[in-house]
Image (cartoon, rainbow, N blue to C red):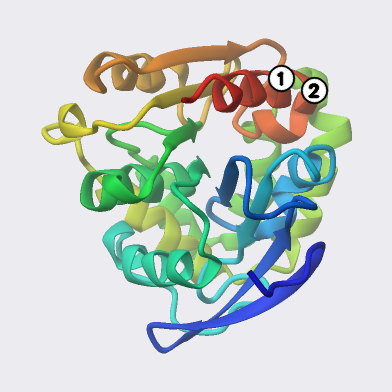
């Protein structure tokens, strides 16, 4: 493997230029590998509290989705539109059966990828996701009619009360520079997503993680997903909302490590 560790690399896949932070173990040919997928209005940096503390323990790749962060290309219209570039990225990374860790929209992409290309995965971790991920129509309408109001509301709604001052301001700063048309396209894709009929076909080890105070994808969606995926396990994180990995990183990382390290 010729990639350097701890830097942003760019990969040409499926006609897209994908930017991806790469962290490699000293002996990159051994050990588990993790690929993190961000959610709507995000980029690779939402996982900084994971790829920082976990570097050296695993090979890690954290891409920016097309049209997000430093990646070029068009934002896909639906969740399935992310599968070709992600499969191409896997071919470039040369990780052996990585664990795919997805948040929100990234969880939907991870679910879709596990259904289509499960043989390439060692496992999936679904954070703040569901077999369906309905979005309040008022949010979608508001992004068209009064985007500033919606952008101001999301950080307060998405984060547990305990963390609003600490994390909410960070999210507000991110959203203030994010294109509202891209956010709309992402949320519309999530709203159309539905694998309730297929989730039972997933055959890779699966961990579901949800903030106990998640109002965007409430715990009921994670509980439903746990019932649908054979052998799946659900972990609720107290004092966390939709961004559990940012709000309570130590608890999240402990749950993630226990799952990954137990894989055979």
Instruction: Answer above or below: position of 50 versus 96.
Output: above
Decide if residue 70 is on the left or right side of residue 107: right
| Residue 60 appears in the picture as rendered | yes
Q: Which mark is residue 12?
A: none
> Can residue 112 be seen?
no
Is disc 2 placed on a helix, strand or loop?
helix
Q: Nearer the viewer, residue 223 or 21?
A: 21
Residue at 57% from the left image edge and 61% from the top image edge:
147
Q: Residue at x 67, y 10 (%)?
A: 238
Location of the N terminus (image quadrant): bottom right
Q: Nearer the viewer, residue 49 or 202?
A: 202
Give the secondary structure at mark 1: helix
User: For the point 36% across and 22% down, which residue is it?
Assistant: 221
Q: Position of residue 49 (x, y in %)?
A: 80, 40
Q: Residues within 10 Å of mark 1 (few under 14, many from 20)?
A: few
How far across and down, in percent of the image, does residue 195 sit? 20, 39
- Circles 1 and 2, Cβ within 8 Å, touching? The answer is yes
Look at mark 1 in the image and give the residue it sits on: 254
Q: Position of residue 63 (x, y in %)?
A: 60, 63
Query: Is 161 situated above or below 131?
Result: above
Residue at 11 percent across and 33 percent down: it is: 197
Percent of width and height locating residue 148: 65, 60
Q: CA distance from mark 1 to mark 2?
A: 6 Å
257 left or right of 85 in image: right
Q: Residue furthest right?
A: 166
Is residue 56 rendered to the left or right of residue 2? Answer: right
Choose mark 1 or mark 2, whichever is in front: 1
Where is residue 205, by image quadrant?
Answer: top left
Nearer-the-camera pick, 55 or 177: 55
- The residue indicated by pointer 2 is 250
Residue placed farthest to the left in the image?
A: 197
Q: Is residue 198 above or below residue 55?
A: above
């Amino acid at each position: 493997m010729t990639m350097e560790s701890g830097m942003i690399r760019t990969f040409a896949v499926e006609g897209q230029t994908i930017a991806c932070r790469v962290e490699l173990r000293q002996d990159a040919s051994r050990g588990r590998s993790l690929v993190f997928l961000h959610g709507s209005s995000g980029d690779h940096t939402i996982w900084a509290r994971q790829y920082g503390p976990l570097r050296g323990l695993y090979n890690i790749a954290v891409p920016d989705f097309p049209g997000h962060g430093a990646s070029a290309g068009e934002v896909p219209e639906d969740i399935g539109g992310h599968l070709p570039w992600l499969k191409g990225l896997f071919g470039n990374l040369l990780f052996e059966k990585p664990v795919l860790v997805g948040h929100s929209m990234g969880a939907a992409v991870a679910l879709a990828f596990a259904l289509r290309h499960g043989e390439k995965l060692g496992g999936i971790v679904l954070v703040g996701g569901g077999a369906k991920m309905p979005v309040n129509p008022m949010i979608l309408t508001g992004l068209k009619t009064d985007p500033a109001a919606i952008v101001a509301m999301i950080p307060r709604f998405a984060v547990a009360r305990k963390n609003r001052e600490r994390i909410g301001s960070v999210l507000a700063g991110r959203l203030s520079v994010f294109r509202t048309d891209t956010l709309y396209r992402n949320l519309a894709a999530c709203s159309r997503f539905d694998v309730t009929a297929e989730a039972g076909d997933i055959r890779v080890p699966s961990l579901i993680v949800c903030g106990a105070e998640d109002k965007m994808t409430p715990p009921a969606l994670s509980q439903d997903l746990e019932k649908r995926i054979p052998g799946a396990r659900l972990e609720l994180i107290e004092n966390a909302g939709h961004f559990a990995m940012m709000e309570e990183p130590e608890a999240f990382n402990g749950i993630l490590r226990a799952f990954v390290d137990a894989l055979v």
